[in-house]
Image (cartoon, rainbow, N blue to C red):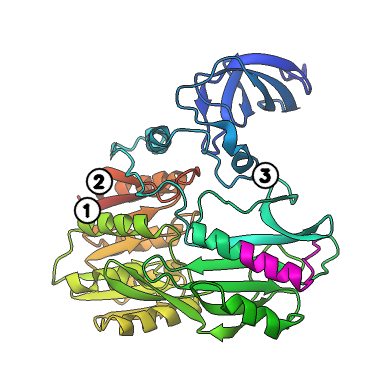
Amino acid sequence: MAKISAPVKKNDVLTGTVMDLTYQAMGVVKVNEHYPIFIGNALPGEEIKYVVTKANKNYAFGRLLEFITTSPDRVSQDNSVYLQTGIAPLAHLSYPAQLKFKQEQIKSLFQKDKLDLEVKPTLAAPAPLHYRNKAQIPVRQIDGWLQTGFYRQHSHQLVPMTDFMIQDPKIDATVEAVRDILRELHVSAYNEEHNSGVIRHIMVRRAHKTGQQMVVLVSRQRRLPQEDTIVAQISELPEVTSIIVNYNPKATNVILGAQERPVFGESYIEDELLGKKFRISAQSFYQVNPEQTENLYQTAIELADLQPDEVVIDAYSGIGTIGISIADHVKQVREIEIVPEAIADAKINAKLNHVTNIDFTVGKAEEILPEWVEKDQAMDVLIVDPPRKGLQPEFIEAVLKAKPKKLVYISCNPATLARDLRLLIDGGYIGTTTQPVDMFPMSNHIESVTALTLA
């Protein structure tokens, strides 16, 4: 049998028109009907000159060399560093076009799975820039200087930077100030190759409503050199109310280690969401776009059409943000969460808000829910906010057995959403609309809310 070869080869220089944009925000040029070439920083409708960087049998990758024509949706090239590092892969696309792109991504996946749901226009974020309330910034030694920045895409090469575009500017200022303190005290940065040095990451969390900031120094050593001086100087920075040293000695890509200790202030900061107070610790899951989170949760609450006599199961509950926010509207809320520390935070948060009609269970949602179904536990409404991998088969099986009359699915991955909706609808649920919510402007991440009811 003759070997099928690619229609292009590495280092070929070609021109073409960009036909589409992938989920990863890569432009797609086709040299024939079945052979796509994926090229960064290229938008649909643009005619470009590019060089092939890698050619496989069924597809290739290329690098943009020059524009012949540009898209009316393209914005300034001043943000190329954000595209290079992957901080903001859609920064070259106008914000209205980003919203349309996200709506179309969900529509396309729904069509593939033959889902007859209307995908509404994406709900725009109040602030498409400077919205993130959390930063995890790598620290490395470059030319003898301790530097903070972000990795170039698909590499561990640090690009030094101080303005991260999508983070709260006060967080950027704190990261820069902490960097300067560490420099002045000659604290060494982590060396990934040799697993040596001290400071691996600087993490900063900022509460949007209260302004409180937490600084987490991720260290390869249990105790920092000149720790008392470092802590004293960082504690004088504006709004810093908590400083944590996190110990991570392992040669790993995981940012936070399991052990940490507060060295200044409390081990948490406090924020407000939909009129409720929440304590956030260093390792808590808390949505990174605080203003849009309120819109996301409000959308979910409205779609759930909650009634005073209903029992709500909140799976994948984190620190209790959704459950505590809806407790006033219903008879009872039952929370499931796999991370014990998150449940500990959730219990404190329930007390902070005087919520008594709520209980908490630690465990995997796909194990706990089937147990509750076997015990015939009441569940009128099920709210799920799973990780990117979506719902596990045994979880969906339990849902279809229990048949709660309403299900609200908050998704961060349209592909697994489409897969799960297909199974739920085939199992007896009906849905009419999906509402995309732009939680992550300038990025290709897509959040959405879908409500289902029993047929």
Q: Which circle marks residue 160 in the picture?
A: none
Magenta residues span 176-192
- Along the viewing direction, whichever of 3 and 343 lies nearer the viewer: 343
- The secondary structure type at the circle numbered 3 is loop
Amino acid type indicated by mark 1: Thr
- The secondary structure type at the circle numbered 1 is strand
Q: Is residue 187 magenta?
A: yes
Residue to which mark 3 is pinned: 153
Q: Where is residue 151 shown, x and y percent of the image? A: 69, 50
Q: Where is residue 327 shown, x and y percent of the image? A: 24, 73
Residue to which mark 1 is pinned: 453
Residue 124 sits in quarter: top left
Residue ID at (42%, 57%): 289
Residue to which mark 2 is pinned: 431
Q: Where is residue 17 shown, x and y percent of the image? A: 56, 16
Is 313 above or below relative to 12?
Answer: below
Q: Nearer the viewer, mark 1 or mark 3?
A: 3
Residue ID at (21%, 60%): 405
Q: Are marks 1 and 2 in contact (CB under 8 Å)?
A: yes
Q: Quadrant of the N terminus?
A: top right
Residue 14 shows up from this direction: yes
